[in-house]
Amino acid sequence: MHRFHHVAAPRFDSAETPTATPRGSDCSPGYWSGVNNGLTKWNEPITDPQWAGAYAQPFYAYQRFDSYFTAYPTIGSEDMITALSNGGGPLPSTKAARELVASILSASWSTTYPYTITDLKARWTAAATASDETTANALFTSLFNDLTAINRGFLCGASLTA
């Protein structure tokens, strides 16, 4: 014989209304490079009709990386989508560039991204113009580590999935 216990339904005061928490998408390089996701929001020259960020679209997918960021030899003349979609590769500079493109898009999309575009560009420039390769690699690695931690956990918001 089974015994069932009556479980009362939750009660809410009239001032309390249960609401669903919107689930956004993370702002990883994978999101921004995905054909069925973020790429459609920035794949056309300024301003892509699907861009609905809090700030102006910073660049578009096929714009040269070195036209927006300080040039660095390992990036060469890659466009933004190539830097974003390369998987990071083995070099600190290419790993940082991948996260940087995603971070700039995220900082332009959302008012709650923890770094400003100015801060992000300054950190890249500091690494790209370092006096020696050891210092540059240390700065690129630091940038990569910081941005990876943010980009894998930061939710741009429910509007990204709409």
Image (cartoon, helix red, strand yellow):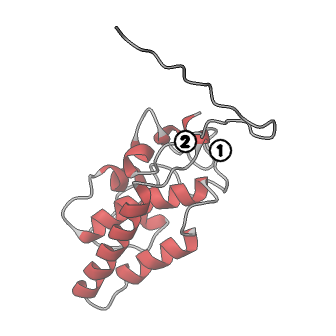
Image-based side of 125 in relation to 138, left or right: right
Where residue 152 sits: x, y (%)?
Answer: 39, 54
Instruction: Kindly identify the residue that appears in the image at 27 percent across and 58 percent down.
Output: 88
- Asked if residue 155 can be seen in this view, the reply is yes
Looking at the rendered image, the quarter that the N terminus falls into is: top left
Q: Which residue is mark 2?
A: 41
Task: Give x and y (percent) for residue 91.
Answer: 21, 67
Lower sequence index among marks 1 and 2: 2
Q: Residue furthest right?
A: 14
- Residue tagged 1: 52
Quarter of image, res 127: bottom left
The residue lying at 49 percent from left, 71 percent from top is 120
Q: Position of residue 105 (x, y in %)?
A: 52, 55
Amino acid, disc 2: Lys
Residue type marked 1: Ala
The disc at residue 75 is: none
**Marks 1 and 2 close (CB-CB < 8 Å):** yes
Q: Secondary structure at mark 2?
A: helix
Please tell me whether residue 35 is drawn above or below residue 57 in the rendered image.
above
Residue placed most toward the observer, 79 or 115:
115
Instruction: Label 1: state its secondary structure.
Output: loop
The crowd level at tag 2 (other Cα within 10 Å; few <14, some 14-19, many 20+) is many
Instruction: State left or right for residue 117 relative to residue 29.
Output: right
